[in-house]
Image (spheres, coloured by chain):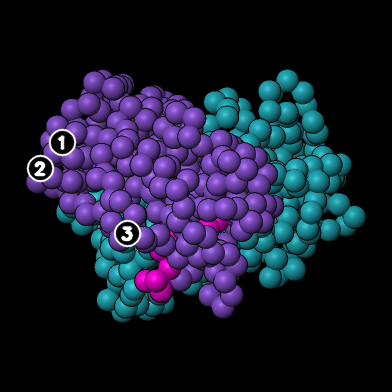
Chain colours: A purple, B cyan
Amino acid sequence: MADDVNVKGMDESDPTIALTDRGLAYGDGLFETVLLRDGAARLWDEHCERLSQGARRLGFEPPSREWLDALPERAPAGEQVLKIMLTRGSGGRGYRPPLPAEPRCYWQFMPFSPMPARWDSGVNVRLCRLRLARQPALAGIKHLNRLENVLARQEWQEDAIAEGILLNDCDQLVEATAMNLAWHDQGQWWTPALTECGVEGTLRRALVERGHLTVTEHAPLSRLLNSQTACLFNSVQGLWPIVTCCDPDNQHLLAQWPIDESVRRLQREAHTLLGHVFNLPTS
Amino acid sequence: MADDVNVKGMDESDPTIALTDRGLAYGDGLFETVLLRDGAARLWDEHCERLSQGARRLGFEPPSREWLDALPERAPAGEQVLKIMLTRGSGGRGYRPPLPAEPRCYWQFMPFSPMPARWDSGVNVRLCRLRLARQPALAGIKHLNRLENVLARQEWQEDAIAEGILLNDCDQLVEATAMNLAWHDQGQWWTPALTECGVEGTLRRALVERGHLTVTEHAPLSRLLNSQTACLFNSVQGLWPIVTCCDPDNQHLLAQWPIDESVRRLQREAHTLLGHVFNLPTS
């Protein structure tokens, strides 16, 4: 099954999927967005591992690593994002999955330009109204059931607000709508545990494994607001220092942070992993 | 927008959807499964209403009622199920939805045969291990983020088990994987409130509105297990009496129920709404 995975990509003549695909019907699948520079994928081990772990969590066989390894080679030159969608394919009876499943893999390349102004000057964020539901069976993996992220991102339109901070339904810190979250305090960088909700970013995993981030559980919003400095990051955009956080109505400033040497150090580690050219602080 | 909704159906030559559709990328959409008899849709008002309410909850304009009304007319003769999928379409930046959205509607007809043996003799069910996460922002609507239902339905393979009972993460009764749940006690039929999770079935809505079902909050599993009789129902299959419920390991019988006159009365109401020929009890 892993060897004869069905394959269809945007570079083929017919960039469509079957109407019966369970990826559409139920969000029954996973995705990855991978940074590529001249066909070289960044954090590729982490992306392949998360995709495979996700498929096993959902109960179907992932494509082999050899098969996946052939994807980045197809990329156009320059900075690109490779989006991979892996679904359980068609079949089954209603929610009941087919056994064995015949997974399908779709991919597309999109040109990518990072936002160095956000690396240098940091970003303004807001607290989201939506609270993430806690579902350990789906936590951590990058599955296709992303309505919570869509609803959260729909809460604001102001371009001056780069991201929204998400709490779970116990008002504990989790992540941002499309990035992971960290804050610096007591001489360490902390990031929330993602065992109940949230997506375990590949850059987050790499930074945790290298000892640059410490995972912490049950952190209330006050841990972020009272921290010395804070940041958001993912494997495509890199690391953005957070300079302000406002409330959901954009009326009150909840906290502001300096862009200090500790955030520059973490940014340097992150951007080295991603191959982003690290810009020296402008101040 | 509601008037120029993009439309594609299985009866067209190319039963595929765009790879960029947000319905696939994020489960950003809704669906309905409608029982049709010779082109006449059952509980059509309820289906159209739930679809429209769902689109508004997700933040996009639903197709007009006039547009929807043209769908059942296309049906082949006999008993059919019309599946409608309504997505936010393509576009936006990542999770951020496009404004305005250009929703797309996909549909397909499938021949349907009910299971009268389950109407007559009832079904065996099991308690699911998975607990539904509570997310009020998505509760009640029939959105495309259905991985919880898929994981729950994947818990068992035995054909003798027709359905699985789902509790929320506070161990309160919610529904079954693809049907709503009711139990009879103190002279009334009760069904769990769906304000935190679960799908508000159209048959459930019709039975509640007509006073045949009373909605109850925060019901623990014991309310079901200690009830006089119990049943599952949806707008396609009709109403199945439950005769036994076993534990997740299929080792222990948690409860068994008679098929009594109260469940036959509710079944008669349900099947009248659906136009199912009501079979007299065999016993």
Earlier-in-chain disc, 2 versus 3: 2
> Tags 2 and 1 in contact by the CB under 8 Å rule?
yes
Measure the alpha-carbon separation of dots 2 and 1.
6 Å
Q: Is the N terminus of chain A in the top left, top right, bottom left or bottom right quadrant? A: top left
- The span picked out in magenta is A157-166
Q: Nearer the viewer, residue B258 or B277?
A: B258
Residue found at the very far front of the displayed protein: A283
Residue A160 included in the magenta stretch of the image: yes
SS at circle 2: loop
Residue beneath the point at 54% across and 69% down:
A246
Measure the alpha-carbon separation of dots 2 and 3.
30 Å
Residue beneath the point at 71% across and 40% down:
B242
Residue A77's tag is 2
The percent position of residue B200, horizontal first and vertical second, equals 60, 59
- Tag 3 residue: A282
Q: Which amino acid type corresponds to the residue marked 2 in the rendered image?
A: Ala
Q: Main secondary structure of the magenta part?
A: strand
Earlier-in-chain disc, 1 versus 3: 1
Front disc: 2 or 3: 3
Measure the alpha-carbon separation of dots 1 and 3.
31 Å
Q: Which amino acid type corresponds to the residue marked 3 in the rendered image?
A: Thr
The percent position of residue B123, horizontal first and vertical second, equals 66, 36
Density class for disc 3 (Cα within 10 Å; few <14, some 14-19, many ≥20) is few
Subunit of mark 3? A
Residue A39's tag is 1
